Image: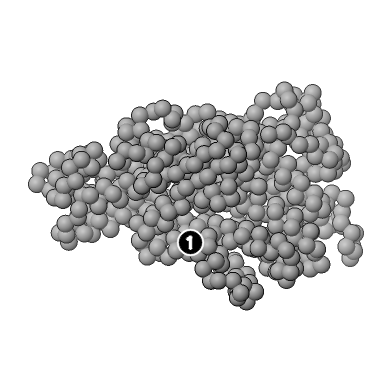
Amino acid sequence: MAGLPLTEDRSKAIFKIAPISVSKQTKGEPMNMNALINERNDDLIFFGEGFDQRNDTCDKQDIPDMNSHARFDSDNVRIPPSNLFWSLLE
Amino acid sequence: MAMEKATPWSMCTAEEAYDRERHMELSEFEATENTFHLPPSRRIADATLCIKKYRRSAAGGGTASSFSQSSSESDEKPSNFRSLTELDDAVEHLLKSILCHQKSHHENMTPRPLSKTAAFVDDRLRAVQVDYVVGYSTTNNSTYEDFHFAHRFHSRMIRYNILIGYLMSEPHVSPSKFEHKFNAHALQSSFSNYFQLFTNHLNLVQSHNDYQSHLETLDEMMCYATILNVSSVLLKQEIMFNATSLCKRLPLFQDGSSFGLLSYANLYLNLKPSLSSTKDEEMFPKWKWAIEVALAADLGNFIRCLDLVIEKSDFILKKNHIQRESRWKCLVRCLLSPTLPTMRIGLLRWYNKSFGKGEKVSGADVSSIAFDIFQCFTFNPIINPLLWYVVNNCSSPDYYITNHPKKHSTFVNWLDFH
């Protein structure tokens, strides 16, 4: 079936979907989640992508689609013929 | 899993089958082995596969039709009316034999797309609901067996509607392949019928040996209804999304109201006296958990919501069978997943206010929140590792699946990144 193969590099998937950018308050340089996790810097300031701090609004287009990377091709899925799926329903 | 054959003409009358043959309305899931692959005009009905089709009242079906066909002022049912046992058999056939294989029992039939299978199953389940509502929903002289069959097929239909709505919620599934509006309506009807059934037969059930087992299922259903309500209200409240378009592809209560909570409140009040001997903490554990989630969501405390879901992260499979406790957790996640963007935006706003006030926020806290959200929801195998396991045909007979960040995971080992 289609979908993210279990062998795909998970770390890439993590950063691809983390919809948060981080900048240092002093420099305003964007940081990725990797830097955030590694540095654990208390001086970090963060904001959501496209998020306007001043008026608490956000453009819809800037909200990442949380499921966009997880391609579960529901139309072409083949449920394996086992009791497992049935045990979800019975 | 062996496919079982139904009794000939137990799910549909021969008259209807022949009528649909003539009008080219016979599905490939209902045709004989030699004709299922042919165009509808040349298909022949298989007596063990035909299932009563849903018809709108204007097309000669529904309530009006049933009343007109029944003999006036008598209890005699029309010929195309199915007993509760037959309705239960039809639901089992649709879910166990058709949905789980995506084909009929013909050996040379290949599995059909899930959307096509779901469209067929949805239509026939709708007909089951019509038959039930018209013939049995207001009956007062039911036996325990009647209750047992109706209780079983209603709860199965609820689980099915939750599951299929989630599986088909990908944006690329077009409305022509799967109509979420119908799915939402079917789910609402199933909940309504289920709670009504339980209310009507409360006295009958309370005196039976299986009472405790039925209470556990009731607890499960009340939990689903509550979580569905939480999802609906959260999405309706979020002005960032186009709720109209979003709700078209999600199994929600369409009005975003408190339908789910109110529909069984009366039932719970009626039940409470009979449960007085039970310890409070043992009563309705799943529903209580769902109420906690609802309360946290109502207060905008999404971290608490996520924590509550993470608590329920262990899934256990035994001998190729999903434990009931795991099934419930899996289906709850199906219902909660649409609200995740809303929760994330809520958290962003929350932090944004702190930044606006010049308050310092720990980077560790921020990363922790981001990962909590991520680990729970943003990736389908993580949202629902159990379901991912099932549809990916993982073959180990016994498995312990967890996405709890603090526990070792044998299956979702990519979570061990920190």
Question: Image point 71% across, 61% down: which residue?
Answer: B210
Question: Image point 35% across, 61% down: which residue?
Answer: B301
Q: Residue B165: horizontal and vertical position, in percent? A: 55, 45
Q: Chain of mark 1?
A: B
Residue B45 lies in quadrant: top right
Picture layout, residue B214 above or below residue B339:
below
Question: Image point 62% across, 58% down: which residue?
Answer: B217
Q: Which image quarter is the C terminus of chain B in?
A: top left
Q: Residue B159 or B22: which is nearer the viewer?
A: B159
Q: Residue B298: horizontal and vertical position, in percent? A: 41, 64
Question: Image point 87% across, 54% down: which residue?
Answer: B78
Picture layout, residue A7 above or below residue B167:
above
Q: Is residue B264 left or right of residue B402?
A: right
Q: How many marks?
A: 1
Q: Residue B323: horizontal and vertical position, in percent? A: 58, 47
Residue B73 lies in quadrant: bottom right
Q: Residue A3: horizontal and vertical position, in percent? A: 47, 31
Q: Which image quarter is the N terminus of chain B in?
A: top right
Q: Residue B66 or B271: which is nearer the viewer?
A: B271
Picture layout, residue A34 above or below residue B358:
above
Q: Residue B260 or B382: which is nearer the viewer?
A: B382
Q: Is residue B97 visible?
A: yes
Task: Name the amino acid, label 1.
Answer: Trp
Q: Residues within 10 Å of mark 1 (few under 14, many from 20)?
A: some
Look at mark 1 in the image and give the residue it sits on. B289
Q: Is residue B229 visible?
A: no
Q: Is residue A25 left or right of residue B297?
A: left
Q: Residue B390 or A61: which is nearer the viewer?
A: B390
| Color scheme of the displayed model | one colour
Q: Is residue B367 left or right of residue B213?
A: left
